[in-house]
Image: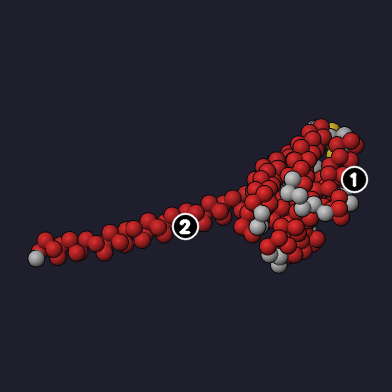
Amino acid sequence: MRKSYGYAEKRPWRRRRLGWGRALLVLAAVGAVAAAFAVVMNPVGVPASGAANLGGTVNTRWGRLSTLDRQLLVKVRQAGLWEIPAGQQAQQRAVRPRVREVGQIIMQQHMQLDADTRATAQRLGVLLPNAPNGSQKSWLREMSGKYGIDYDKTFVLRLRAAHGQVFTIIAKVRAQSENTEIRAFAERCLKFVNTHMSLLESTGLVPRRALH
């Protein structure tokens, strides 16, 4: 009887240890997600020698930095702030496998581009926003209210139209910028945007109005 009683005493402790183990795993997962979110949302500081968000054109060690140059960094940053959550949502809500796949790729690549944007802005002393603009927030709300094939179509429409708009800005900056850092950044951005437009078009859901 003593042996049986001793064995019975050990089992609750084992269950408690397993329970604590599961809880720690959950907390670790939550912490990892929060850390990744903080990396994206972390505001970019201005170096002591940076140009900051001054009006007009200023001199830097990489050449003259114009208002348009700074606007490019801001717009690319804001693009990531809404397309990263949009891509994550598409992986969970889209009904077509290709749309889910495209959402995953766009999310992952925008996380890479966002890190590049923040690093470039840090070097040039440009402050970046930590939230999408009003239109981008409205697009996210619109997609959140869609389901089934309507969701897939809305996701592709909004992202393809947005990429077409930012493409023209990036190309203009690349052609006009006097800053070597910005020119190199614009070239990297163009590669991402071209890839994303091709991915979205590969779904077969891009309407004509998204191309204007």
The circle on residue 56 is 1
Q: Position of residue 21 (x, y in %)?
A: 37, 56
Judging depth in this view, the residue of 136 and 88 nearest the camera is 88
Farthest bottom residue?
145
At x 87%, y 44%, the residue is 168
In screen coordinates, is 89 left or right of 54?
left
Note whether 23 is above or below 185 in the view shown: below
Q: Earlier in the sequence, mark 2 or mark 1?
A: 2
Percent from the top left, x then y, of residue 196?
74, 44
Q: Position of residue 5 (x, y in %)?
A: 14, 65
Instruction: Name, please, the residue furthest toward the left.
Output: 1
Q: Is residue 48 visible?
A: no
In the image, which disc is placed on residue 154?
Answer: none
Q: Tag 2: residue type?
A: Leu
Look at 41% across and 59% down and name the residue there. 23
Which residue is the site of mark 2? Answer: 27
In terms of depth relative to the viewer, which is nearer, 49 or 56?
A: 56
Identify the residue shown where x is 87% and y is 55%: 209
Q: Quick one: SS at disc 1?
A: loop
Above or below for 205 versus 65: below
The residue positioned 59% from the left and 50% from the top of the image is 36
Assess whether mark 1 and mark 2 are in contact (beta carbons under 8 angstroms).
no
| Crowdedness near tag 2: few (<14), some (14–19) or many (≥20) residues, C-alpha within 10 Å | few
Circle 2 — which element? helix
Q: Residues within 10 Å of mark 1 (few under 14, many from 20)?
A: few
